[in-house]
Every structure is written in C-alpha cells, then in structure tokens.
Amino acid sequence: MTTFTTLENFGHSLKAQSYLVQPRSTDEIYETFRLAKRDGLTVTARGAGRSYNDAAMNGGGIVLDLSAMDKILEWDSSTGQVRCEAGVTLRQLWQRVLPDGWWPPVVSGTMTTTLGGCLGANIHGKNNFRMGTIGEHVIEFTAILPTGAEITCSPKKNADLFYAMIGGYGMLGVFTSVTLQMKRMHSGLLEVHAWPTRTLKEQLHSLEDGAPKFDYIVGWLDCITVGHGQIHAANYLHEGDDPDARKTMKLDFQSLPSRMFGVFPKSLLHIFMTPFMNNFGTWGVNTAKYIASLRRHTFRQSHAAFHFLLDYVPNWELSYGRAGLIQYQSFLPKETALHAWTEMLSLAKKRGLPSYLGVTKRHRPDKFLLTHAVDGFSLAMDFKVTDANRARLFQLTQEFDRIVLEAGGRFYFAKNSETTAETARAFYGEETVAKFKKLKKRCDPNGLLESDLYRRIFG
Amino acid sequence: MTSSLTPATPLQPRKRAIIVGACGGLGTALSRKLAREGWTLALLSRREDCPTDLAAELNTDGVTRAIAYQHNVTDYAEVPSLLTRIIADLGGLDLLIFNAGINLPPGLEKMSAENDIKMVEVNLLGAIAWLAPVGDLMKDAKNGMLVGISSVAGDRGRIANPGYNTSKAGLTTYLEALRNRLTRHGVHVLTVKPGFMATEMLRASQGPKPFTVSPERAADDIYKAILKRKQTIYTHPIWGWIMLAIQHVPSVVFRRLSF
C-alpha cells in the first residue's frame, strides 16, 4: 500500500512529499525495491522520523516506514540478549527489559526512536565516553540489500558491512532485525549530581574530570550569556543501594507524568513555551534556569526521567514556530574544543543568531566507518528558523563548518542539515569516502537507496 | 533521469511547480516570475527546443531553477509516468499550473469539427489528464495548489468560437468541481480567466481588443492570487465586471448580438 504523503523532519523545518510504504515483512521491502527500480525511483528507510535533518527524507521518492515491523522477537532475561525487528522503539525495548532488571546500554534523548534508526545513525547517549555508541552493543543484525540479498552481520561475520551499515544512515541496506546486549541494573533509579559551571572552559573541565567518575555526564550551556551552564552527572546504583529496587524497576514507577502539578496537561505546554522562543525570552528563561542551578545538589531520578529529556515536554519542537528548528552539532578533539566553540558562540552572538539550547557531552572514538566520534566533546545547538533569518543562519552554519573543520572536528548526520558534500568529504577523508562508495556499489549497484541526506553529502 | 538539483534543506528550502505549457507568452512570463520568486520549476512544452532554452535562461549563476521536459498534452497516456519522473526530479510538488491551450476560431461562415475537437482535446482533455492525477496526489499529501488557465471565453457560448468556448467552459467547471472536492483536503484550486492578452494567441481573434494586458502583468496577477489563495481571478480584473454583465444578458438578446 503506497500513499503519497507530506513528511517532515523532527525539527519541522523540512517538508517534502514522498510515496510512503509501510512494509510488514522482508519480502515486502524487497518488493518495494523491485517497484522502485521499475519506476526509476529511489528508496529511503525511515523509523520514527526523529532526525533533525534529511536523513529519513526522500523528496519525490519512496520512503519505507519500518514502524510496523515492531516485534520483540526474543528476550532472554538471564543473558540480557534481545532480538528485535528494526521498527521496535527504544520505549518498547526498555519497557520490556527493565522489569527484569536490565536497561539498554545506550539510549538517545527521546525514546520514540526505532532500533533501525538508532543503528543507522549509530546513536550515542550521555555515556558515550564510557559505553561508546549503540553499535558497540550489537551482537548481530540482519539486513536486506537492494539486490535482494539478506545478510547477517556481526563484528566477526561480514565485519566490513557491520562497521559500515551501523552509522551508514540506511544508505547500504535496510535493517530487518537487531540483536542487542542489555546492561544489568540493580535499581530503577540513578544517583544524579547537579552543579553549575560559570564558563565554557569550566564546563569542559567538568565534563573531562567528571567522566571517569560517572556513568553518565551531560552539560547544559546557556548560549545567550555564553558560558553559564549546569552539569548533570549520574551513576548506576549498586546492588543493595536501592532497598525498593523491585518497585523502582516497575513501569508505573518509570512513567513520565502527563500533567504538571497533577492538573495541567503537559501536551499543551509547548504552546506556552512559544512566546519565549526569541532572543529576549530565552535570555530570561536561561537566566532563571541558571539561578536555579546554582544550588549544587544530589538526588535520585528514574532512568526514564533522566534519559528521555526530549519526551518530557511532548511536542516541544512545535514551540519553535512555523518554520521549525535546526540543530547544529559539532564534535571536537579535547585540545581544540574550547577555542573553536568560543569563536563560534561569539560569532553567533555577533550575528544576532544565538542558539536557544546548548548541550555538551564527552566522547571517545569508535571503529565505525562513518563515525562522528572524537576523543573530545560535542556541542549541540538548537536554532530557531524563521523566514527572515534563513539566509543568515545558513551563512552562519557554513562559517561554523569552516571553524570545525580547521579544528579537526566532525559532524553527526542525525543532526546537521546544512553540511555540504565538500565539508563531508573533508572530515571523513578521501579514503573513507572511497571505501564507503565501494561498499555502496557492492550493496546497491543500481543506486536505489538514496535519501536527501545521501544526495546532499555524497551526491 | 537523476535530478541535477541539490536536495532542499531547512535553510535552503524549495517550492516546486510544474508549468504545463511553459512556452507561450503567458507560460514564459509565469516561468520567469516563479523563478524570480525562488521556485524550482518543471517546464513542459510540446516544442522541443523552447523549454530547454527557457530553462537555460532561468538557470543562471550555476543554480538550477528549471528542468525542461518535452510533452504533448494530448499524449494522455504519458502523463502518469512523466509525472512520477518530474516529482522525483523536483523532490516533491507544491503547484501545478495548466497553461497549455490552443485557439482555432472557425470564422462565421462554416464550422470546423476537426478544429473544435482539437481545442477540446488540448484545452480540456489535456487539462483533465494532468489535473486529475495531480489532484489525487495532492489530496493524499494534504498539500498543494492547482492552477488552471481558463478564459473569459468559457463564461458564455458565443457565435465566433463555439469550440474554444466549450473547452474553456468545461475547464472552468472541472476546476470548480476539483475545488469543491479538494479544498477540504488542504488543496487549493485557482481558476484564472484572462481576457485579452498580448500574446500570439490574440492574433487569432478578430474585432476590438479592449483591456488587453501584457503576459507579464497577467503573470504578476496570477502569482498574487496564488499567494492569496484566491479561487477565481480575471485578468485584467475589470473582466470580472464585464463578464458579470455578459452572463446576465438574456438569450433573446444574446442570440442577436454579433460577438
């Protein structure tokens, strides 16, 4: 069943019409490839559509919506191994494994993402410095290639494809099932430490010093005053630390409240955020937030509440208005990060285009072909898009790209929407691009798998 | 054909339009206007060289703003596959302008069934072949706008050109029906009724030509109506009043008039 549909990215900043197909089996995916070839169309896999850019967009082409392939196929609560179809979401996954005392080793900031999407982008969490990306916890996956071949990959079997398809944004094949290793938990709570940081320098120091001591660490950066911030760092509880472990690992304990103060529905909250989505409003909100964060404190928080901040206010992205938002994330080596970001933040301020949300994390490199990771830090910045600022914001992203490239940085393609093919080639390196293109030719000789992202960075 | 366009991004978005009949006076003016306003265009014409030349004219500074396709609107069977190809090339579709039309007046002495059929085939059936499938796609996508270039000639059947009157009356009614069908699905339909316009086609009609507008002026009027999501416009606007009067001329008088 094919429907011509207008699809959007997560930030509601990009819209295009595509033929949406919702396969329920590997055969139906293959059938779609066959039809695409016949009609001269391209195909893009899409999970929950939570990329901020064009990774799951294919204007004028076919989009394979895998969300109907959402069965958890096997779950072994003694070993913590789980085998899922690619459309299973992180929500389904943690809700299945936590009551048995397990948790996904790597999660994104929203639980609505699908495992296929998580593997495609090779997502990381607030524990990237310790646990790496989700790909490092994949025992094996199966995928279908546009040629019709069904393959199984693991770090040992078809290793070249294993390391290229994870983080390959669905440009080589479509994931059909994933086997993941979960992590043992002794509580449904985390011990969270929060403290303020006065400058970017102090924040990066906090991340670097804090990383060895914590299981998770993440920073909030006020990009309007430039420098004020807050660190949240968390540790797992050890066996015996939580006397109510059985209870805290239950689902009703973990569920995010749907109302504020027990009355106000959070689904409407984004409407009340809209008036603050301007330079002055965000300055006020950020300042209030910073003042509130000055109190250093330690508390226990559920896994769901700590990890899935993006789900805390439903549809928060809508508060950015009609033209949506973009996220600009850069990954920089720890030696150059401070200097480059100081330059970028002051440039944004000078141009009158400050980011309304800055998030910093600590990272380490990994072995995946199209990796975005570095031994250093990342800074993600959300920018409101308007008809009036589009051209200037585009210029700013291009200036940012130059600064990041010079500082030896990298980009992450679940996020950045304006990176050009030239910039992508520069940070991946010719050798990596050649290697990827060779694999592309092997997996997809007719060039059927193409997203707008593919055409943008490899076209 | 793979598109020569770079994909749209949030900060470099794209509005995509198909112009069927891009090479006449109005088609060219509309193409230039939309390209100036930042649209990306598929230019269709039955002529071979013209859409390519027009696209080349619009694609300056290394920016692709238009892609040319050769297509005869009476080749109805070709439409579905061509449409798929164009939507893939443009990366989506926001607007269809059906502007193809011919005018072959028979003169007052003798009718020409052959010419009348030809006009209906191009002006009406050609339009249906495009409007119906594009309307269906836009309905599914809950997005888009259809523009049909009809004519004041469709408002009343007159002695000089029954075939042309019929083709445009049919087109006007078809567009109205589509509007009624599609508005509830978020698709907008605009009927454009030009009076006299200074184009090649005008040479075919005889008699006085009051309120003649340039195709550029008409293109500006149409573009404004697109932005304002109007339902029907006359260009020059005074034709709205003239046709209102003409529509109310009783048949007993109208039969005796010489136009």
Image: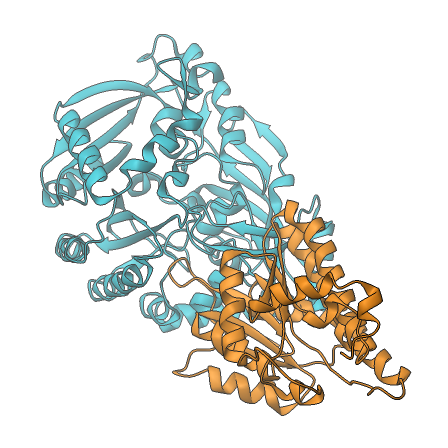
Q: Quadrant of the C terminus of chain B?
A: bottom right
Considering depth in this image, is A308 or A312 the residue closer to the camera? A312
Q: Residue at x 44, y 70 (%)?
A: B37
**Residue A427 pos. (x, y %):** 31, 66
Task: Name the residue nearer the viewer: B33 or B215.
Answer: B215
Colour given to chain B in the rendered image: orange
Question: Residue A394 in the image: x percent, y percent?
Answer: 31, 62
Residue A300 against residue A36 in the figure, above or below: above
Q: Kindly tell me whether residue A337 is visible in this rendering.
A: yes
* Residue depicted at 60% across the width and 89% down the height: B50
A108 on left or right of A81: left
Q: Quadrant of residue A104?
A: top left
Residue A448 visible in rendering = no
Query: Is B175 on the left or on the right of B49, as rendered?
Result: right
Measured as percent of width and height from the top left, residue A420 is found at 37, 67
Chain coloured cyan in the rendered structure: A
Q: Nearer the viewer, residue A148 or B163?
A: B163
Q: Quadrant of the N terminus of chain B?
A: bottom right
